[in-house]
Image: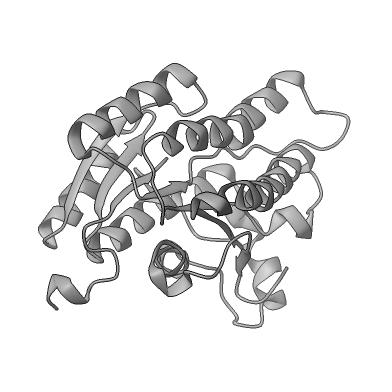
């Protein structure tokens, strides 16, 4: 396919937390549509370079840039490198996030701060800094979760953080519409990632699958096309929307 037919030709995209899982799939799909992709990572440089190599091998353009997006100084450095390399930013995917579970009675202040510093404050700060590089026609996609409305037990803090993401999406959409910048969220259901396996939640798969109309849990490549759609002009009259990509449960 010639680049003239690709949805994101000439665009510059930043995907936070893109060294593995859903973020890696999003970065790869954006690259396949001819966006120049900034693959952000906090600690897994090796994983980020694998994503960059995959995009490059398929004829795309990508760079890996380290930065912990729960820290303003790291975000400012990240945006500085994007400005120096590309001069602007057209697409921001706020994907970086952390998951930890704790039942009521066992919720610690440190856990709350870890989750909200990255999932909520990090999203706010990254968005604010990205706006300095983003002009009319920009698209911001926040990766939320089905838990924002499904509210499973023993996940109060994480659930609350993703509810906050949904509200930030709607509020930012109203504020940024006048600048012709769209803000939407993608809310995945259970998706098989490295994080899902390391958290132990994968053990709940057999209980969840019978509840899913489509009969399986998701894969990262099930989520990424929704992000490409929201990043592209195909969704040019959509903002403040919440996309559930869950296999049918929410």
| Quarter of the image where one finds residue 7 | bottom left
**Pick the front one: 208 or 136:** 136
Residue 180 rendering spot, x and y as whole percentages: 49, 55
**Pick the front one: 50 or 211:** 50
> Quarter holding the C terminus?
bottom right
**Pick the front one: 14 or 175:** 175
Residue 63 rendering spot, x and y as whole percentages: 20, 41
The residue that appears at 16% across and 57% down in the rendered structure is 60
Residue 57 rendering spot, x and y as whole percentages: 11, 58
Coloring basis for residues: one colour
For residue 102, above or below residue 154: above
Q: Is residue 217 left or right of residue 154?
A: left
Q: Is residue 153 left or right of residue 81?
A: right
The residue that appears at 64% across and 73% down in the rendered structure is 209
Q: Is residue 105 left or right of residue 4?
A: right
The residue that appears at 79% across and 41% down in the rendered structure is 156
Residue at far top of view: 73
> Quarter holding the N terminus?
bottom left
| Quarter of the image where one finds residue 118 | top right
**Pick the front one: 165 or 176:** 176
Residue at far front of view: 178
Residue 27 rendering spot, x and y as whole percentages: 32, 53
The residue that appears at 42% across and 47% down in the rendered structure is 92
Q: Is residue 47 visible?
A: yes
């Amino acid at each position: 396919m010639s680049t003239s037919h690709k949805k994101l030709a000439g665009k510059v995209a930043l995907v936070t937390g893109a060294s593995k899982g859903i973020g890696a799939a999003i970065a790869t799909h954006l690259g396949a549509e001819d966006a120049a992709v900034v693959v952000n990572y906090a600690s897994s440089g090796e994983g980020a370079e694998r994503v960059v190599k995959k995009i490059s091998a398929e004829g795309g353009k990508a760079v890996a840039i380290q930065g912990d997006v729960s820290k303003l100084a790291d975000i400012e450095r990240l945006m500085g490198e994007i400005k120096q390399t590309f001069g602007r930013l057209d697409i921001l995917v706020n994907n970086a996030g952390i998951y930890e579970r704790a039942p009521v009675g066992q919720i610690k202040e440190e856990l709350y701060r870890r989750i909200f510093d990255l999932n909520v404050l990090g999203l706010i700060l990254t968005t604010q800094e990205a706006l300095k590089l983003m002009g009319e026609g920009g698209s911001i996609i926040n990766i939320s979760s089905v838990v924002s409305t499904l509210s499973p037990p023993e996940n109060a803090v994480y659930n609350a953080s993703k509810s906050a993401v949904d509200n930030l999406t709607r509020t930012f959409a109203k504020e940024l519409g006048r600048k012709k910048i769209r803000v939407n969220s993608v809310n995945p259901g259970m998706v098989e990632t490295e994080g899902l396996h390391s958290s132990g939640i994968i053990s709940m798969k057999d209980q969840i699958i019978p509840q899913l109309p489509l009969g399986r849990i998701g894969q990262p490549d099930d989520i990424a096309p929704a992000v490409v759609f929201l990043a592209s002009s195909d969704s040019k009259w959509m903002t403040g929307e919440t996309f559930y990509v869950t296999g049918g449960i929410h």
